[in-house]
Image (spheres, rainbow, N blue to C red):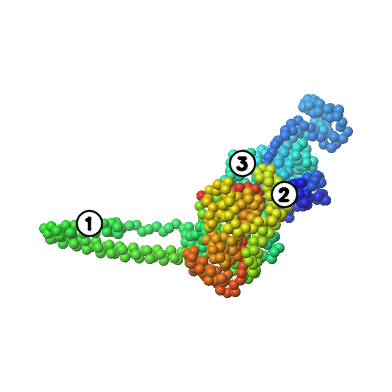
Amino acid sequence: MSSAHQVFDEMPKPVPTSTEVDVLKYSKRVVLKRILGRGDGGLGLIDQRVVVGGWVKSSREMRKEHQPLMNSEAKEGVDGRDAKRVEVFQSRIPFLRTVMQAFGGNNTRTKEKVESIVRKPTHSVSFLQISDGSSVTSLQIMVDSSIAPTSQLMPIGTCILVEGVLQKSSIQGKHAIELKAEKMLHIGIVDQDTYPLSKKKLSLASLRDYPQFRPRTTTVASIFKIRNALNQASHIFFQNHGFVHVEVPIITATYTEELSENFQLSTSNFSTEEPEREEPVSADDHDIISLETIKLLIDEQSKKVEELKRSNSNKEALAAAVQDLHKANLLAAELETRSKSKAKTKDHLATENLFFSNQAFLTASGSLHLESFASAFGNVYVLGPRFQANKSESKKRLAENWMIETEIAFSELKDVMRCAEDFVKFVCNWVSKNCFEDLYFLSKRGDRSLINRLDSMALAPFESITYATAIEVLNKAADTNFETKIQSGVALTEEHESYLVDEFYKKPIIIFDYPKELKPFNARLNDDRKTVAAFDLIVPKVGALIRGSQKEERLNHLNRRIKDIGLQKDQYEWYLDLCKQGTVKHSGFNVMFDVMVVFATGLSDVRDVVPFPRHHGKLNN
C-alpha cells in the first residue's frame, strides 16, 4: 500500500453520527465542509433546513415550460391515465373559460377547481455549484426562477446566501445531495465583462494579476488552506516545546542583514497640504536674476577691465568699468550670503520634519532583537514579515517575505539542528493528516509525488554533513556540469543543493560548519578560526528551507567580526550589551515560511503562495 493511501487510512473519517449540522456562531450559516465532508457525503442530513453561502463556480439552467404542478388535493388518486387526462384537460382550459364567459357565467367554484388542478407553469430552474472555500467539493443549489431571477444567479462569481432544505440530487451526476432553495437572502451580482474569473481556465501566473479574486479559485483556496495549516502547526510545535511567542520591530535602526540589501525608510514627514505660493517677483529681482548670472557678468567685466588697462587709451571708461566690476562683486557677495542663509533655514526645517532622529530600515531579520528575549525567557520565536531590497527575479524570494525565527538559550549548534529537524517533521506530518483533501486535489493537477514526499519527510532521518564534505561530493560529480564552479569558500547555489538532496543523498540534508565569510557576523567562530557554527537545512524540490547558527557570546570575537566586515559599531551597541551583561550560549534558526508553503503544495514559485506578493517592479495594491 502506498504511503499516500496509508495517510488517508490513518486520517479520522467523518462519521455521520448525528442528523444535526453545526451552525457558525457569528454568521448563522452552515459551512459547506460540515455537509460535504461527512463520510456519507451529506446524505444523513436530508430534510434538514440550512442556510449556506458561497460563490457560484458553475451553473446551468433547465426550462420547465408547460409542466403541470398539482396541489396535494389534486394529486390524490391520480395514476398514469388520470395524469394523461389532466394534461388533456389543461389544454382545454382556455376553451372552457370561453364557453363559461359566453353563457355569462362566473362560476367561482368551477374556477377554483380548475386552478386546484393546474397552477401557472414555472419558467426555469437554475442548478448552481457554489463554494465557500471550506471544501474542494462544491454544493449543488436548485433555485426556481420564481425565487430569484435566473439572469442574476447564473454568472460565475455571483455571491449568494440561501435558505433551503437538503435533499437527494434531482439530476444524475457526481453530487449525492443538493439544496432546494426556498428563500434567497442575498445576491451579490457580478459584471461578466470585467470579472476576471469568468474565463473557464486561468493559469496561476495569470491569476497573480488579480490577487483580490484568486482565492475564489479551488486551486488557490487549497494553497492557502495548506498555508494556514502550516501556520497553525508551527505555533503548536513551538508552544508544545515551551517557546514563548514575541513580536519584534519591523522598523529598526540596525542594518540587520549585512549579506543583502535593506529597505531604507524616508523619515521626512511630508505634508499633504498645498505648498504656500511664493510672493510675486519684483522688477528689482528681475534685474538681479541669479547668482550664476552675476558671476558670468563679473567674468565678462573683468575681461573688459583687463582690455582697457592694456590699451591705456580711455581712463574714464576704465574707471567706469572698474566701478561696475566692484558693484557686481558686492552684489554677488550679497547673493551668496542670502543663499547660505536659505540653505541653513531649509536644513533646519528638514531636521524638524524628520520622524526619527536617525536612519531607519525595514528589518530583514528579527533575530538580533529576539536574542534579547531569549536572555530572559529561554526559548522564544516569532512569525512575521521580513524585507529585502534585492532586485532579483528569484522564484523563492520576494521583497516582503514571511519568516519564522527562533532563539534557544543555553543551547549549542547540535541542539538547534535537532530542533529544526523535529520542526520540519512535525509540520509535514500535520499537513498530511489535516489537509489531505487539498493535497490530493493539488497533486492531481501538478506534482503527483507531493503526498509521498511529505510522508517521507515526516518519517525518514535527515543526513548531516559539513560544508567541506558537501564541496567534496560536488567535486566528485564528474558527470554533472554546474554553471557555478565548485570551490571551497564559495556559497552553494540552488543547483548544488538540488544535486545533493535530489540525486546524491536523495533525502533532506543539514549542512553545517560554513566558512565565516558566508554567514552573518554573529555566528559563533569555530576553533579552526575559519568556519562558524552555522547550518542550512536543505529539502528536495526547494533547496534551503532553514538557516541557523549558534550565536557568538564572546564580546571580543563579536567586536572583531564587526570591524572586519565594516559594520557601523554604533548601530550594534545595544546588541553588544547582551554580551556584556549576563551573557549565555544560545542558538537559533530562521524558517523561510513562504518557501515551506511552496514545498508543501508542490508548486515552484513563491508568488503563488503569498496572498499579496511584493517583488521588484510589482506593487499593484
Spatial CA distance of label 1 from label 2 is: 86 Å
Residue 348 shown left or right of residue 103 in the figure: left
What is the secondary structure assignment of the residue under circle 2? helix
Q: Give amino acid for label 3.
A: Leu
Question: Alpha-carbon neighbours of circle 1 within 10 Å: few (<14), some, or many (≥20)?
Answer: few
Disc 2 residue type?
Answer: Phe
Estimate the x, y position of residue 369 in percent, counting from the top left.
58, 66
| Res 285 visible | no
Q: Mark 1 points at which residue?
A: 300
Tag 3, which secondary structure?
A: loop
Please tell me how crowded label 3 is: few (under 14), some (14-19), or many (20+) other residues with Cα within 10 Å: few
Which of pointers 1 and 2 lies earlier in the amino acid sequence?
1
Find out whether the residues at labels 2 and 3 contact each other: C-beta distance under 8 Å: no
Of all residues, the one furthest to the right in this rendering is: 77
Quadrant in the picture for residue 379: bottom right
Front position among marks 2 and 3: 2
Please name the amino acid that badge 1 sits on: Glu
Residue that label 2 marks: 436
Mark 3 vs mark 1, CA separation in Å: 71 Å
Q: Is residue 316 left or right of residue 27?
A: left
Say which residue appears at 56% left-offset and 52% top-offset: 475
Query: What residue is pinned by disc 3?
Result: 202
